[in-house]
Amino acid sequence: MAQDGQVEHFDQSVDRLDARLLLLLTDEPRLGVLECSRRLGVARGTVQARLDRLTARGVLTGFPPAVDLAAMGYGLTAFAVLEIAQGRRREVVDGLAAIGEVCEVHATTGQGDLFARVVARSNADLQRVIDEIVDVPGVRRLSSSIALSTPVPPRVRPLLERIT
């Protein structure tokens, strides 16, 4: 919101109805199109068309289940900053993608070249994962930090609420 209480206008790739629909599916991802249309007070075809458009434009990327990695035995999360050899990013990224415990990788500016979120079963298992990462051709250096908690989990709600 702008200071005067007016909604700021951004590139409206997502309008108010889209945002309300995405909020509804964020809260209850298993809702069907008919139930969404009922709750939003619009036609079923409108909801389907909006979902199709959001998917086609890459705004809505899917409905994966929320999985608690700690409940699966991966109770340790760490973040790794990787320095890599120049010109080898694709090779390094492919190598990291082959390691199951590497959950996500971002190309970054600043101290390192890549920032990765990794999981492990224990400190000893984290050492094994780090060793695998360091063995990827093109990785020159790795610095890691163990997450103690996640006070703000991944979210999109505040951004969607800004539009509604």
Image (spheres, grey):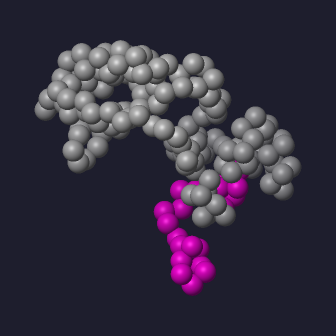
Is residue 95 depicted above or below 45 in this figure?
Answer: above
Which residue shows up at 18% across the image and 23% down it? Answer: 138
Compared across the picture, whether 3 is left or right of 117 comes to right
Residue at the extreme bottom of the image, as rendered: 4
139 left or right, relative to 35: left
Residue 111 image-quadrant placement: top left
User: Does the rendering let one see residue 15?
Assistant: no
Start-end of magenta stretch = 1-21
Residue closer to the observer: 149 or 14: 149
82 relative to 131, above or below: below
Residue at 66% x, 64% y is 164
Asked if residue 18 lies in the magenta stretch, the reply is: yes
Secondary structure that dominates the magenta span: loop
Residue, x 14% and y 29% (percent of image)?
85
Q: Position of residue 95 (x, y in %)?
A: 30, 19
Name the one closer to the observer, 5 or 15: 5
Q: Quadrant of residue 153?
A: top right
**Residue occupying image coordinates x 62% and y 28%:** 67
